[in-house]
Image (cartoon, rainbow, N blue to C red):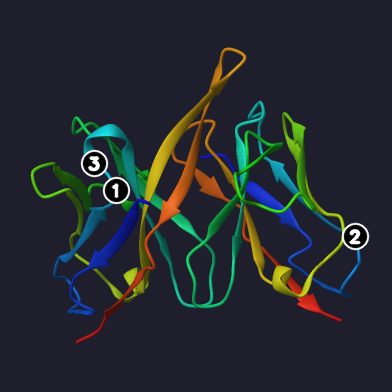
């Protein structure tokens, strides 16, 4: 049973860089794609981006060039860095596994396993 | 980015009720849509993928339908454990976008 666990500082100062790690256990990170999603307090979900096992990435343009997702297959971990943070980046951050499902010539993506989430507060 | 609009934003229902939540995309997304359930303080949980396919382990009272721009999540007989917030998510193109959520509350 694959499990994901987010880790990192719970408090980040404005203008600094938020850094989180997601550790994958119970399975290899080298066989799927991996995503980050966040949820501001009392609000909905926002997709941040994904990274493949080979290191290709795709990010939400709303975060401009502030986001970087990387992968370390030797540690079975992937990471999120978000630079120049403001109070608007205060949120619960989730990591999730993205798996493909193909049928009838079409392929879909599912977020089938999620971490429990970690709360990050941006404040001085 | 594709906008996903859910309705209603919230609803009150009783155990045993049939509940329907809709999700409308700002452009056609084939059937590249999933539904997720989130309980307070917990991570979202996948219910439906490819608009109508039931995720393994999810009770059969949950069903999804739709294609193109209009989608529906139906709970055929609401159970106490179903009171939660439900989100749709389009994976047709990037950036993936969620609906704003529908909170299902006890009547």
> Foreground mark, 3 or 1?
3
Indicate the secondary structure of the residue bearing disc 3: loop
* Looking at the image, residue B104 lies above or below residue A52: below
Indicate the secondary structure of the residue bearing disc 2: loop
Which subunit holds the residue at mark 3? A
Residue A62, position as x, y percentages in the image: 38, 50
Judging by the rendered image, the residue that carries numbered circle 2 is B18
Query: How packed is label 3: few (under 14 Cα within 10 Å), some, or many (20 or more)?
Result: some
Which subunit holds the residue at mark 1? A
Tell me: A56 left or right of A2: left
Q: Residue at x 57, y 12 (%)?
A: A105
* Looking at the image, residue A47 lies above or below residue A16: above
Indicate the secondary structure of the residue bearing disc 1: loop
Judging by the rendered image, the residue that carries numbered circle 3 is A28
Q: Which mark is residue A89?
A: none
Tell me whether marks 2 and 1 sit on the same chain: no
Q: Residue at x 68, y 36 (%)?
A: B51
Query: How packed is label 1: few (under 14 Cα within 10 Å), some, or many (20 or more)?
Result: few
What separation in Å lies between label 2 and label 1 (alpha carbons)? 42 Å
Query: How packed is label 2: few (under 14 Cα within 10 Å), some, or many (20 or more)?
Result: some
What separation in Å lies between label 3 and label 2 (alpha carbons)? 40 Å
Tell me: A8 left or right of B59: left
Which of the 4 image quarters holds residue A6?
Answer: bottom left
- Of the image marks 3 and 1, the number of the one nearer the N terminus: 3
Q: Which mark is residue A64?
A: 1
């Amino acid at each position: 049973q694959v499990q994901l666990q987010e880790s990192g500082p719970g408090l980040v100062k404005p203008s600094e860089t938020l850094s989180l790690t997601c550790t994958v256990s119970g399975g290899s990170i080298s066989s799927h794609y991996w995503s980050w999603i966040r949820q501001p307090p009392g609000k909905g979900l926002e997709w941040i981006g994904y990274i493949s096992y080979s290191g290709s990435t795709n990010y939400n343009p709303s975060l401009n060039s502030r986001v970087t997702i990387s992968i370390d297959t030797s540690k079975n971990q992937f990471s999120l860095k978000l630079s120049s943070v403001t109070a608007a980046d205060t949120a619960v951050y989730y990591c999730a596994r993205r798996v493909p499902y193909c049928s009838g010539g079409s392929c879909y993506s599912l977020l089938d396993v999620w971490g429990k989430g970690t709360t990050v507060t941006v404040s001085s | 980015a594709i906008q996903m609009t859910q309705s209603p934003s919230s609803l009150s229902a009783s155990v045993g009720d049939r509940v329907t939540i809709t999700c409308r995309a700002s452009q056609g997304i084939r059937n590249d849509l999933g539904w997720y359930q989130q309980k307070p303080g917990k991570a979202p949980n996948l219910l439906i993928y490819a608009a109508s396919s039931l995720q393994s382990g999810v009770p059969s009272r949950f069903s999804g339908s739709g294609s193109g721009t209009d989608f529906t999540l139906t709970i055929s007989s609401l159970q106490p454990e179903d009171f939660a917030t439900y989100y749709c998510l389009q994976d047709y193109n990037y950036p993936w976008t969620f609906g704003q959520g529908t909170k299902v509350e006890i009547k």
